[in-house]
């Protein structure tokens, strides 16, 4: 009833409605850029239909953006379900989608059970501590962390922290060196051969060296930063700093010469030149480098964790491989998909940042 | 409604008190007389069923009863595990009996490691691939039912090895570590059947000098996969990796170590000497918890074994399927597929004084190190005794046992209070030789293949010392 009266309201003239529609479309167009960055471009046609666009072309667009990828996934799952049971390994047939999904549930149940055990552990510890207090030995009372095994979710978190740590070190090393070699041909000439030689080295070759060095140097362990985590993080660093370094150097070197000349005329200090001129214009390429670096880092991390026995996803895969139970393969596949999905999300985040910075500098 | 809630609240309160009282009673029954100096500990293990005492002590709360907060962590291989203990990253670990001895005498990484607790007896097997078993089987006599007569001696394998040799193909076998029980057991079995397993020398630590069968290291959990890949033709390893080969249909266990040497000592719990000196109470507390776990494992004629299997099958411990682990843990052993035989003592954790660290056990391992050249030069009997006494620590073990008896948690009869640490001469070996821990040199002289008192390995040959 109210809508009818509203549309008949003489106060709202037809051009007004059209204008509103236009502004709605403009808003959607603006939103679309962000949605595309986030990988949710398929929402746009839906919004357009909701806003009153003619459904036909929009539905076609939706099919392109959402239907076809979903179809691809569906075909993959069907192929997988069809082929997997026919490949027999010594651990039984390769698990199909159903078994893998079951293991997702099992790992979640396991996580919950482990958390309950942790609660029971803390209760027992409280009783014990109370006893110590009653016995007048309050100085021996201590709250300890749960001693049980890390669950799958804990392992994902450990992996993320490790890769973030390694990536952070890589960034703070690679960006300054990249700037230096972008600015000075001498530095670039000196570093280039080293970079070219070290860049293709596999993480597996670095790992024994890193392990020995870390064992020798990092003697007083801190609980938050176990040795194995440092080893994997540094391996990640060694393998992931190259794309950032090279792209930063490139970005800095290809800065507009006029800009630099203006800087010189204004007699800007080196620091100001770097902060005000060089960094902003090199940012898009730096971020391209960072995005590549993070991708490499995540890939390297899994291998490093396997060998360094750092309690993350890599170790999960390795442990399950060693267990060789009939459920191991399904669990390993869960880890494979987890690694893939997280890698994809990390890439999206970096892509979002990259585009954001490209926009700001192009303005 | 009102009437209902009141009693329920009461009962809840009552239940909570009962629980609290029970909890306190449980704790006071074995009063914490010990004050461990270090309470947060990390222990390492390799995925093998004989790590069970550690898992049970954790799961049954025996560590917590002693006021210890223990984290247990699987290790990638024996070398990583030993390094972990030496660097202090691990406070203790499930170790091969040979590891503390080898580390102490400086074969491999040198460090003074001691053991106050033997973890089990027996528990290993030798498996060959299906292909080799097919070649071997005709040489094995069969009983009335057509089943091979056990124990299968290595004589049955000898023609196969010779055939490989004649064809110029290396006969590769896997064992888990140069100083592992498995290495010595595999060597013992091969040598007893006339197959030379090779010598070590100070300059060549491959252990393949003069060898008919070439032995190399593969970590236990990878044994089945390596066998399947054809890199090795057979291996000696602990459970569940022999039964895994049967279940996967890739190999046939031919003999268990129980048949090579009845009730042979297997794993030990190793810690650095420094740790035991710095934290004596912690060491005793750990030993107490482990003794209780071992008792639980063998209680009432292995009644708890199925529960133990369920715990070990969890991915954080051994992680293999329950049925695979249960095969050996519950007193049976499957040889050829379907050929399931009773081996009630395949895994012994407590009975026969299994957990007492006998000096004679240490001497046997040292004698084998000498036999195969890991100890390059002759040592006299007093040396063996001295090393055994510096590594095996029954003094700590008996202190722990005494406290358990006093607390009413263990029976006095279960511990050998009066032994001097040497078992009576043992002769239940596959080749019927006798081992007397007090006379290692004489024992070495009695072994058919192997270095004798004055032998040394130089340039790939055995030579007399001093020439």
Image (cartoon, helix red, strand yellow):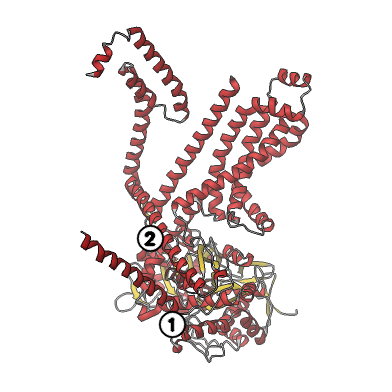
Chain ID of residue with mark 1: B
**Relative to the observer, which residue lies in front, B367 or B4?**
B4
Which chain's residue wears label 2? B
Marks 1 and 2, how far apart in space? 42 Å
> Going by the image, does B81 lie left or right of A331?
right
Q: Is residue A156 left or right of residue A275?
A: left
Q: Is residue B169 visible?
A: yes
Q: In terms of image quadrants, where is residue B334?
A: bottom left
Please state if A332 lies on the left or on the right of A263 as rendered: left
Residue positioned 32% across, 8% down in the render: A14
Q: Nearer the viewer, mark 1 or mark 2?
A: 1
Name above or below for residue A64 compared with residue B163. above
Q: Give the left or right position of residue B194, taking residue B134 as reference.
A: right
Asked if B331 appears above or below A354 in the picture, the reply is below
The numbered mark, 1 or 2, whose residue comes first in the sequence reads 2
The answer to whether B282 is drawn above or below residue B411 in the figure is above
Q: Which residue is mark 1?
A: B409
Q: Which mark is residue A153?
A: none
State the residue in front, B207 or A304: A304
Instruction: Locate residue A110: give its quadrant.
Output: bottom left
Q: Say which residue label 2 marks.
A: B248
Q: How many marks?
A: 2
Give percent across and percent down for residue B302: 36, 78
In the image, residue B171 sits, relative to residue A103, either above or below, namely below
């Amino acid at each position: 009833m109210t809508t009818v009266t509203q549309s008949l309201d003489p106060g709202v003239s037809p051009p007004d409605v059209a204008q509103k529609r236009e502004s709605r479309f403009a808003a959607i167009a603006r939103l679309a850029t962000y949605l595309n960055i986030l990988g949710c471009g398929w929402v746009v046609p839906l919004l357009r239909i909701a806003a009153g666009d003619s459904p036909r072309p929009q539905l076609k667009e939706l099919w392109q953006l959402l239907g076809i990828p979903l179809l691809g996934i569906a075909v993959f799952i069907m192929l997988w379900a069809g082929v997997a049971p026919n490949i027999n390994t010594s651990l039984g047939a390769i698990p199909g989608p159903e078994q893998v999904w079951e293991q997702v549930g099992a790992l979640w149940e396991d996580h919950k059970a482990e958390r309950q055990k942790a609660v029971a552990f803390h209760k027992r510890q409280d009783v014990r501590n109370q006893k110590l207090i009653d016995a007048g030995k309050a100085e021996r009372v201590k709250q300890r962390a749960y001693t049980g095994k890390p669950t799958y979710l804990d392992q994902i978190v450990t992996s993320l922290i490790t890769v973030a740590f390694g990536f952070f070190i890589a960034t703070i090393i690679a960006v300054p060196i990249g700037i230096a070699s972008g600015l000075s041909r001498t530095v670039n000439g000196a570093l280039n051969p080293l970079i070219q030689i070290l860049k293709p080295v596999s993480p597996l070759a670095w790992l024994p060296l890193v392990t020995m060095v870390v064992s020798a140097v990092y003697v007083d362990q801190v609980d938050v930063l176990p040795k194995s985590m440092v080893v994997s993080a540094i391996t990640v660093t060694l393998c992931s700093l190259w794309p950032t370094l090279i792209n930063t150097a490139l970005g800095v070197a290809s800065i507009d010469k006029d800009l630099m000349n203006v800087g010189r005329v204004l007699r800007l200090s080196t620091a100001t030149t770097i902060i005000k001129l060089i960094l902003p214009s090199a940012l898009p390429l730096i971020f391209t480098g960072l995005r590549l670096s993070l991708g490499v880092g995540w890939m390297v991390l899994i291998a490093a964790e396997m060998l360094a026995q750092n309690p993350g996803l890599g170790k999960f895969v390795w442990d399950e491989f060693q267990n060789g139970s009939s459920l191991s393969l399904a669990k390993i596949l869960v880890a494979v998909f987890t690694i893939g999905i997280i890698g994809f999300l990390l890439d999206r985040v970096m892509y979002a940042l990259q585009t954001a910075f490209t926009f700001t500098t192009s303005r | 409604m009102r009437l209902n809630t009141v009693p329920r609240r009461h009962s809840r309160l009552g239940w909570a008190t009962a629980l609290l009282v029970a909890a306190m009673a449980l704790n006071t029954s074995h009063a914490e007389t010990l004050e461990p100096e270090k309470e947060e500990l990390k222990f390492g293990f390799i995925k093998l069923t004989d790590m069970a005492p550690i898992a049970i002590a954790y799961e049954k709360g025996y560590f917590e009863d002693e006021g210890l907060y223990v984290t247990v962590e699987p290790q990638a291989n024996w070398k990583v595990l030993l390094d972990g203990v030496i660097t202090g990253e691990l406070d203790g670990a499930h170790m091969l009996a040979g590891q503390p001895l080898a580390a102490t005498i400086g074969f491999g990484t040198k460090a003074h490691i001691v053991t106050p607790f033997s973890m089990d007896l027996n528990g290993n097997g030798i498996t060959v691939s299906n292909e080799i078993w097919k070649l071997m089987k005709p040489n094995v006599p069969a009983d009335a039912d057509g089943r091979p007569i056990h124990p299968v001696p290595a004589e049955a394998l000898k023609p196969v090895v010779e055939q490989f040799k004649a064809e110029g193909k290396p006969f590769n076998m896997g064992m888990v570590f140069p100083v592992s029980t498995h290495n010595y057991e595999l060597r013992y079995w091969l040598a007893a059947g006339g197959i030379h397993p090779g010598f070590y020398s100070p300059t060549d630590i491959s252990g393949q000098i003069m060898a008919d069968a070439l032995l190399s290291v593969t970590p236990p959990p990878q044994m089945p996969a390596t066998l399947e890949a054809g890199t090795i033709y057979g291996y000696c390893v602990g459970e569940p990796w022999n039964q895994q080969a049967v279940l996967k249909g890739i190999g046939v266990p031919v003999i268990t170590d129980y048949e090579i040497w009845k009730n042979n000592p297997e794993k030990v719990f190793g810690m650095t000497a420094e740790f035991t000196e710095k934290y004596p109470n912690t060491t005793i507390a750990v030993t107490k918890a482990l003794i209780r776990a071992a008792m639980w494992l063998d209680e009432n004629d292995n009644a708890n074994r199925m529960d133990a299997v369920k715990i070990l099958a969890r991915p954080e411990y051994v992680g293999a399927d329950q049925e695979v682990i249960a095969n050996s843990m519950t007193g049976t052993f499957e040889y050829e597929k379907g050929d399931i035989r009773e081996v009630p003592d395949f895994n012994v954790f407590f009975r026969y004084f299994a957990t007492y660290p006998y000096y004679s056990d240490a001497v046997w391992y040292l004698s084998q190190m000498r036999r195969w050249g890991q100890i390059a030069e002759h040592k006299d009997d007093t040396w063996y005794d001295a090393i055994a006494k510096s590594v095996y620590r029954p003094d700590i073990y008996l202190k722990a046992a005494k406290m358990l008896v006093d607390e009413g948690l263990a029976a006095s009869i279960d511990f050998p209070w009066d032994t001097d640490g040497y078992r009576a001469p043992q002769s239940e070996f596959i080749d019927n030789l006798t081992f007397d821990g007090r006379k290692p040199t004489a024992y070495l002289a009695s072994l058919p293949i192997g270095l004798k008192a004055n032998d040394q390995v130089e340039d790939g040959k055995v030579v007399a010392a001093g020439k």
